[in-house]
Amino acid sequence: MDYIIWMDSEKAQVFGLNTTGIEKSNIKKSGVDHHSNVDNVNDEHLNHFYKDLTAKLSGAGEVLIMGPGVSKTHFKTYLDSHDAAISKNVLSVENSDHPSDNQILEVGKTFFKKYEFFNTEVQPAQQN
């Protein structure tokens, strides 16, 4: 399965692309505390977030990472050191503020031209 990921520092929207359509799932950073100033606690939560996101991408084909700020770049760096197989399949890391699902998929069209279903409805991912 190929993936489009839109992410910021607290959540990720993951669009799984396969021959039957598009499935969307969400991953949230656990233990988000906007009032915490303890860097190592925040780093621990961020690493757990990246680990959860990496697990979702297990066995991924091609991956497009999008988002505002530096989180997308930090996640790519995390992949470089923690999962080289996924990292080598990252097509691009793109800047994107806070788009709608349709806007995310519009960007995805330019990278995943082999799929013809970008105008179909996005389905929620099946829960395992």
Image (spheres, grey):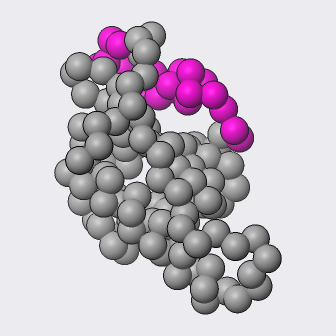
Q: Is residue 72 left or right of residue 110?
A: right
Q: Residue at x 60, y 24 (%)?
A: 103
Quadrant hosting residue 34: bottom right
Give the image location of residue 117, x and y in percent. Answer: 35, 13
Q: Residue at x 61, y 89 (%)?
A: 40
Give the image location of residue 109, x and y in percent. Answer: 45, 22
Q: Is residue 23 above or below residue 121?
A: below
> Taking the image as drawn, is residue 73 in sight?
no
Q: Which residues are magenta?
A: 97-117
- Number of marks present in the image shown: 0
Give the image location of residue 22, x and y in percent. Answer: 35, 25
Q: Is residue 78 above or below residue 23?
A: below
Please check the rendered image and state whether residue 115 is part of the magenta-colored stretch, yes or no: yes
**Foreground of the two, 36 or 92:** 36
Which quarter shows the N terminus? top left
Give the image location of residue 65, x and y in percent. Answer: 49, 46
Please check the rendered image and state whether residue 58 is part of the magenta-colored stretch, yes or no: no
Q: Residue at x 47, y 28 (%)?
A: 108
Q: Is residue 112 above or below residue 80?
A: above
Quadrant hosting residue 79: bottom left
Q: Is residue 89 above or below residue 110?
A: below
